[in-house]
Amino acid sequence: MSDIVIKAENISKQYRLGNVGLGTLSHDLNRWWHDIRGKGNPYLKIGEENDRNVKGESEYVWALRDINFEVKQGEVLGIIGRNGAGKSTLLKILSRTTTPTTGQIKIKGRVASLLEVGTGFHPELTGRENIFLNGTILGMTKKEIKRKFDEIVDFAGVERYIDTPVKRYSSGMYVRLAFGVAAHLEPEILIVDEVLAVGDSEFQKKAIGKMKDVSGKNGRTVLFVSHNMTAIRQLCRCGILLENGLIVSEGDIPILLKKYLQSNRSEEELQPLDNYRNYSIKDSPISIDRVYVLESDNLIPELSMNCELTIITRVKTTKPIKYGSVTFRLTNSEDVNVGMAFSWDDDFYLNVQEAGTYEIHFKISNHTLTPGKYFIQVGLNQTDKTIAWDGISNYPIFTIENKNDVVAYLHRPWGVNHFVGNEWKLCKL
């Protein structure tokens, strides 16, 4: 058990909603009265789950509830969840910037935290002075800080402004320097929140590389919170998934990401496609219900280059149909056509014997799409009579990440990606 550096035991955090200070004295007196009678805090019994979509009845809410986990030395733990799930609250407790309402945290080693822009920096001090201030707070000697100073400045790329007060820095410069300090001053535990999103892509790549070095080569522990699933997938092997202040799952990152994205997808699916529907005939026997994409059977909206992807169109039919066909057209963020597919090219037709819900799977074994965001147009047609049943346009479908520094050629001519000879399948749900 000596390799465990962080242990959370029954961590809960309760907050009171509404105006701060309203009724505080009466509540404090009530707590004191219950405490001297040995009955405990009465407000711990009335708090509600932290579901931001529900108004609730209580003025107390549990931002975290009964959190238990362990982190071993050298691990990179990813913490994922929707906004308001409790991720930042958990990091603040681990960083000891706030205390849990119940439970305890056991931490072995020095902790460096990067929770939000400006954390730990004094705005009136220069970048140089803040480096020494942060190093001193971490318990380092002046000699140790000097030894790391040039490396920090070079990593942050702010040498020209190092003797300028940080209040004059841009948010990106602020974060670059703050991360450089946190990562280079040799803490045993590095805690990083979504703040990296402030930086540009070049900085994010450097930061992820540095966190890999910190954990892999130096054997230090990293806790990483991000909504960038690609960064989580690159950096972390294990993680925890938070929802409404509770741990709903923990374990290997690929499994967690699939669960997280599926839960988000279910929320998105409640939104109708009508905003993207460009035509639908009256009394159409078939209509598009939703569209999504899989990479190698995983529901991930950020795809890899040259991956195997499957476009899935869920449809609802009201009666049997015959000789139906499907058309796909992909466009990039500048509305340039980059790919197309017609089911009849692969001798695939929709023949449905009974009404119901079906999924049309179109698998592309090896696409040649370059990095960027892509949108889809889907059309359902009766082939033998050339009747257009239903269609959507400009539906945001996926993003291809630039993992290999490949330049994205945005303006590609029509027909470059004419997907032919790929697998089509119709599945009844």
Image (tube, grey):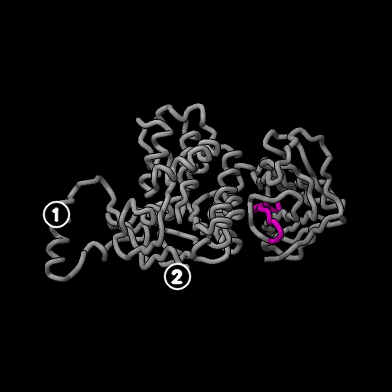
Name the residue beneath numbered marker 2.
2
Of 344 and 88, nearer the camera is 88
Which amino acid type is marked by label 2? Answer: Ser
Task: Say whether residue 366 is left or right of residue 277.
Answer: right
Q: Earlier in the sequence, mark 1 or mark 2?
A: 2
Residue 357 in percent (x, y) is at: 67, 62
The boundaries of the magenta stretch are: 284-297
Residue 332 in percent (x, y) is at: 70, 38
Q: Which mark is residue 244?
A: none
Distance in Å between CA atoms under marks 1 and 2: 45 Å
Which amino acid type is marked by label 1? Answer: Ser
- For the image, the number of numbered tags is 2
| Kind of element beneath mark 1 | helix
Residue at image location 39% in from the left, 56% down from the top: 94
Quadrant in which the C terminus is drawn: bottom right
| Kind of element beneath mark 2 | loop
